[in-house]
Amino acid sequence: MAEPEKRGRGALKRALGVAGLAVAVALAFGAGYAVRWAVTPAAAPGPAAAGLAPAETPAVWTCSMHPQIRQPQPGKCPLCGMDLVPVAGEAETGAAGPPRLAVTPEAKALMEIRTALVERRFPTAHIRMVGKVAYDETRLESIAAWVPGRLDRLFVDYAGVPVKQGEHMVLLYSPELLGAQEELLQALRAVRSLEASDVPIMRETAEATVRAVREKLRLWGLKPEQIQAIEDRGAANDHMTIYAPVGGTVVAKHANEGQYVQTGTPIYTIADLSHVWVKLDAYESDLAWLHYGQEAAFTSEAYPGETFTGRLAFIDPVLDPKTRTVKVRLNAPNLEGKLKPEMFVHAVVQSRIAAGGRVMDPALAGKWICTMHPGVIKDAPGACDICGMDLVTTESLGYTSADPEAAEAPLVIPASAPLVTGTRAVVYREVPDADRPTYEGVEVVLGPRAGDAYIVKSGLSEGDRVVVQGAFKIDSELQIRARPSMMNPAGGAPPAGHQHGPPDAGPAPQDAGPATQDTHRHE
């Protein structure tokens, strides 16, 4: 092919590429105008083309590419030279008015705005916690030497052995025990020798000595049948057997055979694992929904698909400053022995919330409970069967009264409705009876979050409709229009960040308004 012909075809391709680019730019500008005018429907720079009567001539004109430009009359954009367009509906609220936005039905569909009703109902909060299984400290028993001596035999050689109450555990040699037995035998012989005495005081003194020595041996750990065996035998025994005071599992062995021990030296630790504690960590934001006596469900990786239950027995009054959590404890039955101490668990507490943050629990409504033993629940006042403490009403612990159906429901909104900045919360409420979809920003005071809803303390009324999808788009449009919004309650135009005009185009005119934060939000 000749060189001139190649150069001609190359020039033709470049010309077609430039033409295609121009067409793409034109289509992009057209799409921008279409979306922008769907929100603020204005068809042309002039009032007649915008469909406005002469009396409705807009007071503000802006650039569709640089919305921070605000001028009181039509003209050209000082940044890109495009014709300014009227801001439809700008007269509704000024820059200092309430945040309100009116859109066309088409714009509402494009923005995918969805609303929900503000209603009164009982939300359910799901508090999820993690923790591990631990010994029930109230069911731990320590076998210790009650008298000095030598451990001649340990019948349990290692930890983990299950034992029953009354089983022999230790054979202890003790010289002091031998002396006490001799003292008992001498006192018995004295009583028998004074049976025929005419001096009652001597006989009574000898009998008192026998009672005192028997009590001393009992306090040293001898059972009544052991003491009786010494008396029947008439001879002292230099060894004593220590028996298990409770049934359970030996979880620790503290001494070895042949070791000399003093009074109080621990030998074994026995734990009753038929009941265990479950220690959990709860976030401080969940404390409003946790109450003493609540039932909780928890699972363990060791038993997939199996759910265990326990009752909330303790909430630590002090927050952990490092983890920002609060220690919570459950009392859980473990009759099958599946739950092992140090086993990790995942727990869930479900709280159905009434007005005032009270928990609705039919099993506890109108009941009386022990503040030390949450398993002791009665229908009438009285004393705890375990510790003897007076029972208290469950209502004093944050539960509803005896008639849960009479409880007042709190005012709630979906959790996706409020825009929370950290210092305040804004909800966009649908304005009723408007000629087109109109949304107004309302600052609300929120209570704690309960599941998929927030409790509203003030700012809304029952029956209002609030935006639950598309609120960020409404707020972004208000920021573009320099109206009051979530991040800028005072209003004002955002700064001119992305420039399309020439570098020497100069700053925006003074009537563009003060600059605001250029905040980018995504749904």
Image (cartoon, rainbow, N blue to C red):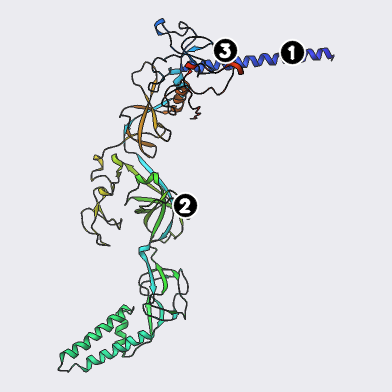
User: What secondary structure is found at the residue carrying circle 2?
Assistant: loop
* Pair 2/1: label in front: 1
322, 412: nearer the viewer = 322
44, 514: nearer the viewer = 514
258 left or right of 392 in image = right
Looking at the image, do the residues carrying marks 2 and 1 touch, with CB atoms under 8 Å apart? no
- Distance from disc 2 to disc 3, alpha carbons, whole Å, reads 68 Å
Q: In the picture shown, does residue 132 fall above or below 30? A: below
Q: Position of residue 99 (x, y in %)?
A: 40, 23
User: What secondary structure is found at the residue carrying circle 1?
Assistant: helix
Whichever of callouts 2 and 3 sits on the residue coming sooner in the sequence is: 3
User: What's the amino acid at mark 3?
Assistant: Gly
Q: Which residue corresponds to the image point at 40% horizontal and 69% vertical from the top-left?
A: 270
Location of mark 2 (residue): 304
- Distance from disc 1 to disc 3, alpha carbons, whole Å, reads 31 Å
Location of mark 3 (residue): 81
Check residue 12 in the rendering and tell me which mark sits there, or answer none. 1
User: What's the amino acid at mark 2?
Assistant: Pro
User: What secondary structure is found at the residue carrying circle 3?
Assistant: loop
Instruction: Place residue 215 in its image quadrant.
Output: bottom left
Q: Position of residue 240 (x, y in %)?
A: 37, 82
Whichever of callouts 2 and 1 sits on the residue coming sooner in the sequence is: 1
User: What's the amino acid at mark 1?
Assistant: Leu
Looking at the image, do the residues carrying marks 2 and 3 touch, with CB atoms under 8 Å apart? no
Q: In the picture shown, does residue 477 fall above or below 138? A: above
